[in-house]
Image (tube, rainbow, N blue to C red):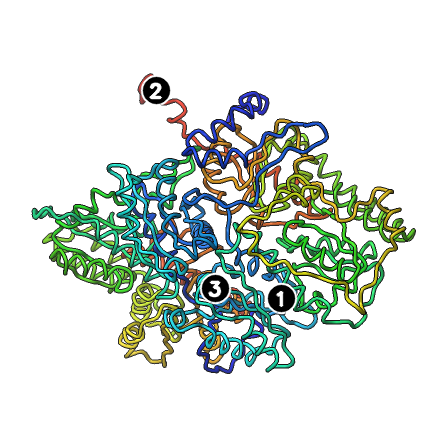
Amino acid sequence: MTTTTSEKQAAWEPAEVKAELLARYPAKVARKRSRQILINEALENTTPEITANVRTTPGIITMRGCTYAGCKGVVLGPSRDIVNITHGPIGCGFYSWLTRRNQTDAGPDGENYMPYCFSTDMQESDIIFGGEKKLTAAIQEAYDLFHPRAIAVFATCPVGLIGDDIHTVAKKMKEKFGDCNVFAFSCEGYKGVSQSADHHIANNQLFRHIVGENDSPREGGFKINLLGEYNIGGDGFEIDRIFRKCGITCLATYSGNSTYDQFASSHLADLNAVMCHRSINYVADMLETRFGIPWIKVNFIGVHATAKSLRKIARYFGDRELSDRVEEVIAEEMPEVEKVMAEVRPRTEGKTAMLFVGGSRAHHYQELFAEMGMKTIAAGYEFAHRDDYEGRQVLPGLEVDADSRNIEEIRVEPDPDRFRPRKSEKELRQLTESGLAFKEYEGMIPDMEKNTLVIDDLNQYEAEKLVEMMRPDIFCAGIKEKYSIQKLGVPMKQLHSYDSGGPYAGFRGAVNFYREIDRLVNSRVWSYMKAPWQVNPQLSATYQWE
Amino acid sequence: MLLRHTPKEITDRAALTINPAKTCQPIGAMYAALGIHGCLPHSHGSQGCCAYHRSTLTRHYKEPISAATSSFTEGASVFGGQANLLQAIDNIFSVYDPEVIAVHTTCLSETIGDDLKQIRIKAEKEGKIPAGKTVLGANTPSYVGSHVTGFSSMVKSMAGLVEPTGRKNGRVNIIPGWVEPCDMEELKRLMDLIGVKFIMFPDTSGVLNGPLSGEYAMFPEGGVTVRELRAAGDSIGTLALGEWCSADAARWLDARHKVPCSVLDMPFGLAATDRFIDTLRTIAGVNIPEQVAHERGQLVDMISDMHQYFYRRKVALAGDPDQLISMTEFLVSLDMCPVHIVTGTPGKRFEERIREITGEAPCPVNVRAGGDLFLLHQWIKNEPVDLLIGNTYCKYIARDEDIPLVRWGFPILDRQGHQYFPTVGYRGGLRILEKILGVLLYRQDRDAPEKSFELVM
């Protein structure tokens, strides 16, 4: 623990690091991986191209999960008043039960199924003779026990293989009940190449079965939806607090602490603010096409990003009172944040971080580290696509490969009665000219410094190599990666579920994060690795007892 | 209330499992495989299975869990996973260089009918398995049994590696079952103390309770070696601890290779430990050292000292069959009243064993194999208890019903100690009592009126 930061940075060259990462792979694997490992070089007006959203090579210890995890675990998991039934053997439901730290407030209606795990627990006979009968009975039993607002069904791998028609079962049960919406997700784990495929599947079904179901007017001014915020560690609660303070009404959060009715009336909002571009941009696009609600990219991770996002929302509404209120809120909140920032910064300045997480967080969290004077020297996503790295301008040129082709694209048309452009063409043009970008995400790479490393779908072997060679002061990924990194004597922060703690979003979240990272990178524990006799193993003389 | 939608009234459920008291087979196979030295478990299925199992084991142990996956895509699911597994074996030996790859199947690869044995033979023929390295496999479809039977299947596959020479080696095979790494350590300590030479498999001690030293070894020192497993065919006998976890492997060795076996309950609590130690004595023909009797005496001493706090206290338990059988017996021996007992693992034999053990009990007993925590909670609402013993998921019931909870079983995601402090053997029995007394007496202190608040308890 005597290595200083400057020594560490001098110790590696990006090209050498890349070569070393690839050295041990069989030739075919090395070729593939070399396209997913990119040295960020400033090219003439273009962002370097990376390969992403491609299959993980079998046998390589990946960080990725599956399609079911993306759908049931991530997108629908945090919706509190929907009974989410996993149709499959018991494991999938069990592992996605309460493990993501989505905080939930049961609200005045008291409906909260988050602490429950519902499964059809398919047995061998169901695999042989089909599971539709059992699914039908399970839906009935759930309805009889709870009378929920909605029941959702999630398919696991064998369901697709044996051909259970879960959508027909759901439709029949919905018709039978009359007062309970039942819908299903074909989110078998083998679909796509990562969790990402199922974000798309989840988005489609949410849009098809819930969005627009409730037309009763919603109270409040400056109505928006917050898309792609999952309330891990209470992030969504902090953002809600800020919105309330500013006078912004958030109709629906997709999907932290969400309810059926929030989704059902989200088409009444006037703006969609997109946090996690990867997991939810499909819904944003569909809401725009069908109902005329524009979307902008926001980020509430980092105080500067938070302030910028609030200002973007205010500018969109073009209301003086709202703009003033937003400025007041920022001015009110900043002193406490700046106080803590100033307090920790002498201890974190110049330290280095690596971020390998998610489809947005590896980008968003660079903001917070920068606020602490820390540099991100390597980053990458677990399941993002090229647009999340390079920006949405690459979208038209993206090739649709065999794995993506199987994921349904819904064709959405403007709603004959309810399509209502929130802004005229002229207003949108003016806003765009004034710097408010609609449907725009520039991706992670442009925000990273030259000669940093951008690595897609990092695996355990590469993570270990990176840490050994580049010795970052902190490494961020998920639970599976946590302890192998820490065994190397480098602190590891989970940025999927945050280990413990949070929120890290918004103003108060930033304060929590500064303190947490200060605690981790300056912890004394990293100096305890060696015992005295290991530090000085040579016995030069024996101790003389007096 | 966290489980606010759970009604007191119990209705039959035939199709819907709510709040399971089990998980699927592959995670058990993965845990068992981690108890082989130099072994990389491999999940033959889609990525999510492996990610979920690694995450759960990591959260339970706070240790790195390395395991690979065949990363099935839709194509593999249609055309079969052979190509994926062959490629995986090749990549794993090139990149991670383990001694052993222990492959287990999933519901996906089982439903499409991949034949592990045939794929392994093909891998051998194609030279994908380097000389001296081992690939073994276990069938663990998630739609059969539970995590417990998956563990058992992988243990049986480990037994399949034996290469009997015909010359007995004077050792005893010991199959500890799904217990914690520290429990395996404690069993080894007892056998060393008694002077029994043994081969223990699996053995996760030293693998899943490792130190922090600034160095990361993907394959730590611990685990049973392939060489030891080969020698297990020459052992004088096999002691299998736990009918559900360990008996299959032991009986197979008996039937196939004439290695006689005894199947015992897991040595949790006084009587089960007595039987374990006494069996060791007879099969190895040794005298039990005074130290062991001393440890036993300490356990009996604490039971006697604290009996008033145990007597007639009602207990609800959730967990796995082998553990619950021994724990129920222990509780009965303390004069406690286990009144609700649930395992998610199927098997009527479990209910029969619990009925036998609680036959003389003064309270009616609810027992269910293939049950879930929702049912357990409903039973508790109808017949309240003084203590709940189970995994971390039980804390939702414990909080809602305000019942002291002793965390014991798998997974434990919110407390520490289970990796380090054993609950097997007499010393382990002391720890179980310490934990039970801790929560019961804390509760008594918390609830006591000021005038009867006790200093000495």
Q: Nearer the viewer, mark 3 or mark 2?
A: 3
Of marks 3 and 2, which one's residue comes earlier in the chain?
A: 3
> How many residues crowd mark 3 within 10 Å: few (<14), some (14–19), many (20+)?
some
Where residue A80 is drawn, which disc sits there?
A: 1
Give the left or right position of residue B339, taking residue A276 as reference.
Answer: left
Residue marked by disc 2: A538
Q: Nearer the viewer, mark 1 or mark 2?
A: 1
- What residue is drawn where x is 84% and y is 49%? A326
- Real-space Cα separation, disc 1 to disc 2, in angstroms: 62 Å
Disc 2 element: loop
- Real-space Cα separation, disc 3 to disc 2, in angstroms: 64 Å
Q: In the image, what residue type sits under mark 2? A: Gln
Foreground pick, B220 / A164:
A164
The lab-note entry on whether marks 1 and 3 share a chain reads yes
- Real-space Cα separation, disc 1 to disc 3, in angstroms: 26 Å
Residue B334 location in percent, x, y? 32, 69
Locate the C terminus of chain A and report the quarter of the image it occupies. Answer: top left
Disc 3 element: helix
Q: State which quadrant residue A434 falls in.
A: top right
Above or below — where is A117 with respect to B190?
below
The lab-note entry on whether marks 1 and 2 share a chain reads yes
Above or below — where is B343 with respect to A37?
below
- What residue is drawn where x is 41% and y is 31%? A24
Q: In the image, what residue type sits under mark 1? A: Arg
Q: Which chain letter goes with mark 1? A: A
Q: Is residue B76 visible?
A: yes
Look at the numbered discs 1 and 3 and tell me whether their residues touch, using CB distance below 8 Å: no
